[in-house]
């Protein structure tokens, strides 16, 4: 692989600055990924408070279906 001639190469201080900035950016993205994963796990682990109302709605739906099937005049 051919190397760039010294005339076209970026100065050493600029290459070091860009390398450090890239490392910091990668560390930032890694940290954000870990935090997002932890937040989603915590959100998924929380109890589902809507479950009782869903059960109530399903029971009501079943009662209505049974009421439609029951003959008229019977309790």
Image: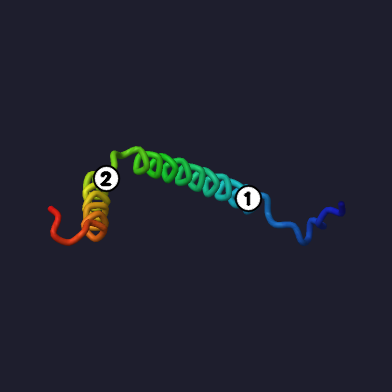
> Residue at horizontal 24%, vertical 49%?
59
How far from the left and from the top, in percent, is residue 18?
Answer: 60, 52
Q: What is the count of numbered marks?
A: 2
Cα–Cα gap, marks 2 and 1: 60 Å
How far from the left and from the top, in percent, is residue 70?
Answer: 22, 56
Q: Are marks 2 and 1 in contact (CB under 8 Å)?
A: no
Tell me if 49 is positioned left or right of 44 in this view.
left
Q: Which residue is mark 1?
A: 13
How far from the left and from the top, in percent, is residue 49?
Answer: 24, 44
- Looking at this view, is 67 or 57 the one in front? 67
Q: Which residue is mark 2?
A: 51
> Residue at horizontal 24%, vertical 60%?
68
Q: Between tags 2 and 1, which lies in front?
A: 2
How far from the left and from the top, in percent, is residue 6?
Answer: 79, 56
The structure's colour scheme is rainbow
- Looking at this view, is 42 or 57 the one in front? 57
């Amino acid at each position: 692989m051919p190397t760039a001639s010294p005339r076209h190469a970026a100065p050493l201080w600029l290459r070091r600055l860009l390398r450090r900035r890239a490392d910091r950016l990668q560390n930032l993205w890694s940290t954000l990924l870990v935090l997002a994963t932890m937040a989603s796990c915590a959100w998924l682990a929380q109890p589902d408070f809507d479950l009782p109302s869903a059960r109530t709605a399903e029971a009501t739906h079943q009662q209505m279906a049974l009421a439609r099937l029951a003959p008229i005049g019977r309790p």
